[in-house]
Amino acid sequence: MKLSVAANYEFDLVSQLARYPVVEVYGKFPAAFVGGGRPSYMGTPLTRSDLAVYVSLLSRQNIAFNYLLNSSCLGNREWSRRWQRKLMRLLESLGSMGIQRLTVSTPYLLERIKAAFPEFYVKAGVYAQIDTPRRARSWKDLGADALTVESFSINRDFATLQAIREAVDDELQLIANHPCLPNCQMQPYHQNGFAHSSDGSRRLFLDYCFLSCTLQRLEDPSLLVKAGWIRPEDLDCYEALGYEHFKLLERGIPSAELLKRVRAYAGRRFTGNLAELIPPYGFKEPPEKVKLWLLRHFVRPGQVNPLKLRPFYTLMKGQGLLFALNRNPVRIDATKIPADFLQGFQDRCCSRLSCRECRYCEEIAREAVTIDTRFQLEQSAQLREARQQLVDGRLWSV
């Protein structure tokens, strides 16, 4: 087992991570001309000197830092001389800090980096959509040193996972604790929204996709089981297929929460609330950045009246995304997930089945998933209203 863990840039956490099989920590500047896989407001305020110190601390513990250049869209700016020069300066700067690993999601960026700086170890990220043996082989042929498999939809498709493993001999990585819905129709739009909300353009980003999928989960709790997360107890099933590298989310969260996830997966056992391992619900201790950081990213009077964003602010507090919650309102009881949970997917191909006919996840959710009733009612109403303001244009009075 080898773990790749999200960076929150808290120096005290580094020595604790070194006690576990953590080989890599990943992150990036929250806003940069090459965007990433999270909006800037989800990132941690970070200077170049902060990053250099952090990378040095990791290096002393024999942990690598992987800098994310994993934007799914570069906005056609990559064809300008100015952008190209900025890219070369960034890569030189990262190299001077001792950073030797990068993650990309666009084929062109992979080839461009390898042409200019072949010494970088470059991983294809999850947004590269590697979900077939052919795609895996294509990325390898372009020069990728490692591949992140499209965990959102195929973490439980063992025939496809085995076929991909047989197609390439490179490092393959799975995301172990994501909450995303399999084959989600929002996925490409969501990824592009993240790309442009972290590229330094300072445009307002209102996460319509998050509002939509979070509402779906509250209305249909079985989606919390259908999401392709991997239990700590089930890692050996993936290792038997040849998958030894596992990525743990989420960036910018409190150290205690990150460490809880690392301990659970390193220990291959967790008997508590699985929702504590999976974004996005509930932190008892919020990140320190919140108030001014949110103002910086959401006050855009030229785009929308800031006063009309109050319901969105209330929603974020209720979800526990960037604010403290006294308790986690969502519970996925690990002890009520059958020990042979994955066996139920060995004989099924979820992409070819109707959930209405199968009902495997629904039956498990009925036993294992509980949601605080007040939270469910209040958040559903707020999500529905916030989403509708975007859909009918009331937010902009048009």
Image: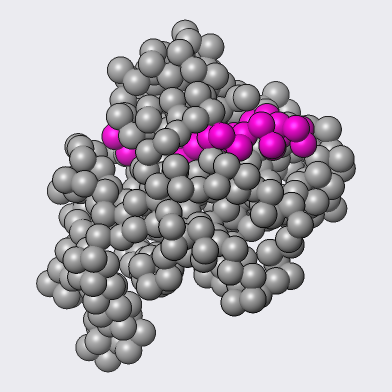
Name the residue: 80% across, 51% down.
159
Image height of 290 relative to 347, above or below:
above
Left or right for 34, reference 315: right
Left or right for 304, reference 201: left
Observer-nearest of 271 and 324: 271
Residue 171: % across, % down: 73, 32
Observer-nearest of 208 and 161: 161
Image height of 183 relative to 109, above or below:
below
Quadrant placement of the C terminus: bottom left
Say whether residue 191 is magenta: no
Quadrant placement of the N terminus: top right
Name the residue: 68% across, 49% down.
343
Name the residue: 46% across, 60% down.
365
Residue 380: % across, % down: 28, 73
Image height of 37 relative to 196, above or below:
above
> Magenta stretch?
232-254
Residue 276: tell me if it is visible.
yes
Left or right for 5, reference 346: left
Name the residue: 25% across, 43% down.
283
**Residue 287 lies in what quarter of the image?**
top left
Residue 97: % across, % down: 49, 20
**Residue 258 lies in what quarter of the image?**
top left
- Rendered image coloring scheme: one colour
Residue 346: % across, % down: 74, 52
**Residue 285 lies in what quarter of the image?**
top left
